[in-house]
Image: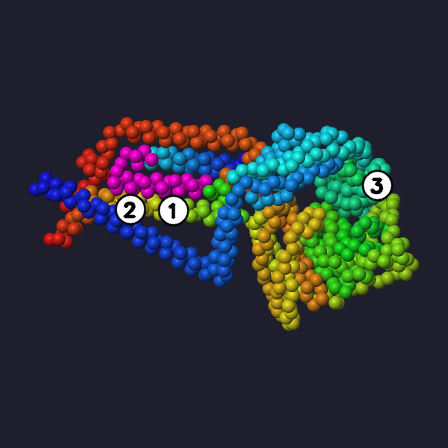
Amino acid sequence: MKRKKKTSKKNQKKKPAKKSRLGFLRGMAKVLGGLTAILMLVYFSAGLFLDKGFIKRDLGEKYGRVLGVTTLTLKMIGPPNKPVLTATSMCQNYTAYVHLSWNADDQVDYYDIDRDGAPLVSGVVTNYYDDQTVAELSSYTYTVTAFNSLGQNTSDPVSVDVLDCGEPPPPPVLTATPVCVGEAPFINLSWTSDPQMNYFDLDRDGFLLAGNLTDTEYADGAVTELTSYTYAVTAFTSQGQVTSNTVTATALDCTEEPPPPPPPPPEDATCVITRFQNINLSGYSGTPSTKERKPKFYGTTNIANAIIEVVVTGETSVVATTSANQNGYWTWKPQNKLNYGTHRIWVTAIDPEDSSRRKTTSLKFKIKREEEEEEKEEEVETPSTGTTVPSVPTTPVPPGVPETPPPFPPAEIPSLEISVQVLNPDNVAYPGSDLSVETKIDVPDDAAGQESELQYWIVDSDDNEVLRDSNKIFIDGDLTIRKDLMLPGLLKPGRYKILVDVMYSGTRFIAEDSFILKEIPLVSLGAGITLTTGQIMRNLFWVILWLLLLLIIFFTLLAIEHWICRRAIMQITEENLRDKGFISRKKIT
Amino acid sequence: MTNEQIFTLTTSSLVIALSLAAIVFSFGVVWRTERELDISYKLFLGAIIAFTAGQFLEMFSFEGRDVIMFLAPAAKLIFAALFLAGTLTARDMLRKMDGEKEERKENTFE
């Protein structure tokens, strides 16, 4: 009976085998279809539950962009275009170099540069390169070759004669002397100069303390008694810069009597506007003026990392917020042009740890037209020299006539608070990706609604604008606006600021936040270890060696496995496995 | 390099090395077997290839590379689907070996 049953099963098997396979495939298709449907349902339900704009953003933008990238990829049907190369000899810090630049091309993977027919550098992914390995007064011929997966194309050769960049001046010799002025400690600094030197930057403990100094001395009053500070001065010439020796000085204890048992209250806050454009305000009398409609203000405070609130009044008022560095040094410039005429700027330094500790100073200044330059020339005075203690140029007044500054805050400023925050993790963004920012605008409940424009600027560390965007808003209450700004793909890595600006009741309100732009890594090895294209290109030998090793091991193992299988008797059938008890369980009776 | 980074690097390297070894030995089983056992191992092979591809894609997945960020989870989905399909094929085969399916048919005819 058993044998019969087996035989009949064997005979039956041949025909239904195809049927059962088809049935199985149909079943599988059903399972996969059902699984996909459930997953899609969960995906869209969760998306809609979490964010009502999900459909538009997720399908419209995310997958739309994926399709866009695919389209771009499909367009690449040939080798890259011929690069148009320009070569310029330049000097930096008395060292000559050749700046090469060529037109950007999205279809290019990387560039190789040849100098005088020999390879200079390969794997360049930017559309510029600085050749630092040149000899002065020599001549070189460059070519650049663009590569992509479909071929290459080489530019026309370009020759360039390298400049003679001269010899640097001797570095300044810096001396520091702690002194007391009354009961206030100061550290007087002085340094040697050279006719080539145009201006100086003074650093304290590695951070900028005062910039663009034309004097050769400075009195640092933002010091704490019995605390040591390390100073260095950097001289800037038309060709570069030289840095002095570093000196360390300890501020004196200027109090005559020992302090009372309870700790003394924190020292009074100071806030000084030291420079307006190129005008040193130390000892300056009169109303400083400039024809630059986006003038830059420089100043110091004795509050480390202070919040700096700026209010500029005029035909259109401006309210802005920025921050000082660790030494209390700050700069600010408006992003929109100020109107011609006289303005007043109020600057308030606020302690970020104690908002009650604050100091406000003000300055009247003028933006003059081109034609006014001659008649008002006397107002732009050359900076005074020999000042050791920077005076507080609050409220400059006409000579001999004392002027009382108007009360702060000015009455014409409407009540509105604006803040901006970068939402990217760790405030890090990458070229060609989105920078997500959230802007909050708070207005009083009884404020009348009005339409306005929200403007976004991204500026680099030198306040150069690299991106601008805007959108219309209607301010009729507290608002929270999220915006994704697509950063240009060729931005250099570094620290950038995002400025948000809104016009409300004739006043421009500006808030800012900063972020770090990093080069997009090519490979992530986990735990924050990343490799950029440049790093890989620099270690190309080791990368290729390891990859080859991995591939050789893999294919050797595969070949061995295949060889073993070819020599096998091939008796591992399901029936043999069942007969030998490898895959069959105990039969259910 | 921190201990966490060393641990992550080691485990990532091991995952890739073991996945590549699994691909090789799955090929060995596919070349030796036939019919449903062969199909199930082909599905397992597809699953481990998709998993390895997903691991490699994750290494290149950064914000701004939308296509790769889309493909890396897709590879993991393919891995899960093929693994499930392979398991179901093997299960189907075992049930046939145990005579569960045929027995039911016979009962129906009776």
- Region in magenta: B27-56
Q: Residues within 10 Å of mark 2 (few under 14, many from 20)?
A: some
Q: Which residue is mark 3?
A: A216
Judging depth in this view, the residue of A387 and A11 nearest the camera is A11
| Marks 3 and 2 on same chain | no
Callout 2: SS: helix
**In the image, residue A546 lies at what x, y percent?**
48, 30
Judging depth in this view, the residue of A350 and B47 nearest the camera is B47
The mark closer to the camera, 1 or 3, is 1
Q: Which residue is mark 2?
A: B88
Q: Which residue is mark 1?
A: B78
In reply to whether residue A120 is colored magenta, the answer given is no
* Subunit bearing disc 3: A
Up/down of A585 relative to A409, above or below: above
**In the image, residue A512 lies at what x, y percent?**
66, 55
Q: Do tag 3 and tag 2 residues touch (Cβ < 8 Å)?
A: no
Residue A541 seen: yes
Q: Residues within 10 Å of mark 3 (few under 14, many from 20)?
A: some
**In the image, residue A443 lies at what x, y percent?**
64, 66
* Subunit bearing disc 2: B
Query: In which quadrant will I find the N terminus of chain A?
Result: top left
Which residue type carries mark 3?
Thr
In reply to whether residue B44 is colored magenta, the answer given is yes
The mark closer to the camera, 2 or 1, is 1
